[in-house]
């Protein structure tokens, strides 16, 4: 059975799309935060690879074709931002301060937790880029001497959690302003969270898209500074 999959170039693509499709169906049926399509897809893929004893590299041979769409998809995030450019001009100070506060909170919380749990330096810097996109986070982690593979996993988990609970958290803390929602989601949970922001509204999606870029830059600068604290 595994030999069949090893010779199939598009096995990874099929498994990824099929798993995500199941996630969408479950989300549509039960409408629960835990039924996040991306989370469901990750679980199904892991289970299939484990049960059928398929090497992860075999899966990646096909799944990599989906990854090619990541760059144009990220660029497309500029569209909603452009559509809300006038709103951004009117509130640019609040937007920039909000993103800066989010980045500072992320880095400071990692530092505090690292001290409490007595993490070593490598483990500490591995977690610093948890809230930015994978491409930037991998570079930051490698440069600071962290465990890159763990950084990737942490970034994905952060994004999924943000996507799952962003709306609930905004409701619990009575965050009603669209700009504030977008900044909070984009700064804390990068592109995966931005998908949820776009579901909430055009303004939320635009502000979240902007936050991905700005928070990425600020985290690169801030992580280098915070890395010296331990």
Image (spheres, rainbow, N blue to C red):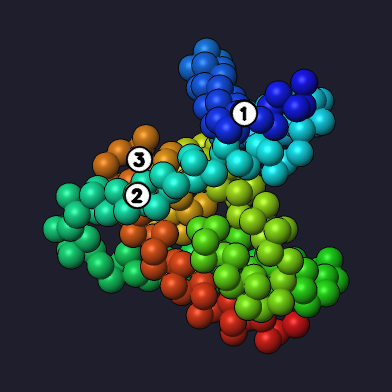
Q: Is residue 161 above or below residue 153?
A: above
Residue 108: x, y in percent? 62, 72
Q: Is residue 116 above or below residue 66?
A: below
Residue at horizontal 60%, vertical 49%? 156
Calculate the distance from the C-alpha at mark 2 to the C-alpha at mark 3. 17 Å
Q: Dot 2 lies on which element?
A: helix
For disc 1, the marked residue is 8
Specify the label residue 72 is tagged with. 2
Calculate the distance from the C-alpha at mark 2 to the C-alpha at mark 1. 26 Å
In contact (CB < 8 Å): disc 2 and disc 3: no
Q: Which quadrant of the view contains residue 201?
A: top left
Residue at horizontal 75%, vertical 27%? 3
Q: Residues within 10 Å of mark 3 (few under 14, many from 20)?
A: some
Residue 105: x, y in percent? 56, 67
Specify the label residue 198 is tagged with. 3
Q: Nearer the viewer, mark 2 or mark 1?
A: 1
Quadrant for the C terminus, please: bottom right
Residue 8: x, y in percent? 62, 28
């Amino acid at each position: 059975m595994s030999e069949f999959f090893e010779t199939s170039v598009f096995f990874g693509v099929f498994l990824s799309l099929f798993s995500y499709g199941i996630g969408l169906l479950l989300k549509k049926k039960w409408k629960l935060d835990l039924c996040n399509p991306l989370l469901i897809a990750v679980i199904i893929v892991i289970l299939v690879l484990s049960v059928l004893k398929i090497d992860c590299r075999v899966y990646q041979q096909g799944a990599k074709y989906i990854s090619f769409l990541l760059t144009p998809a990220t660029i497309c995030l500029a569209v909603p931002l452009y559509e809300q450019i006038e709103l951004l001009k009117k509130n640019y100070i609040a937007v920039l301060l909000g993103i800066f506060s989010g980045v500072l909170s992320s880095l400071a919380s990692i530092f505090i937790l690292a001290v409490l749990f007595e993490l070593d330096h490598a483990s500490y810097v591995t977690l610093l880029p948890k809230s930015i996109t994978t491409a930037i986070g991998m570079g930051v982690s490698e440069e600071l001497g962290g465990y890159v593979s763990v950084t990737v996993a942490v970034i994905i988990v952060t994004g999924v959690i943000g996507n799952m609970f962003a709306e609930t958290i905004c409701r619990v803390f009575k965050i009603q302003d669209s700009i504030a929602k977008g900044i909070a989601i984009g700064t804390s949970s990068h592109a995966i969270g931005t998908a949820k922001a776009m579901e909430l509204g055009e303004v939320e999606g635009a502000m979240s898209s902007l936050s991905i870029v700005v928070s990425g830059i600020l985290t690169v600068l801030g992580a280098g500074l915070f890395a010296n604290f331990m």
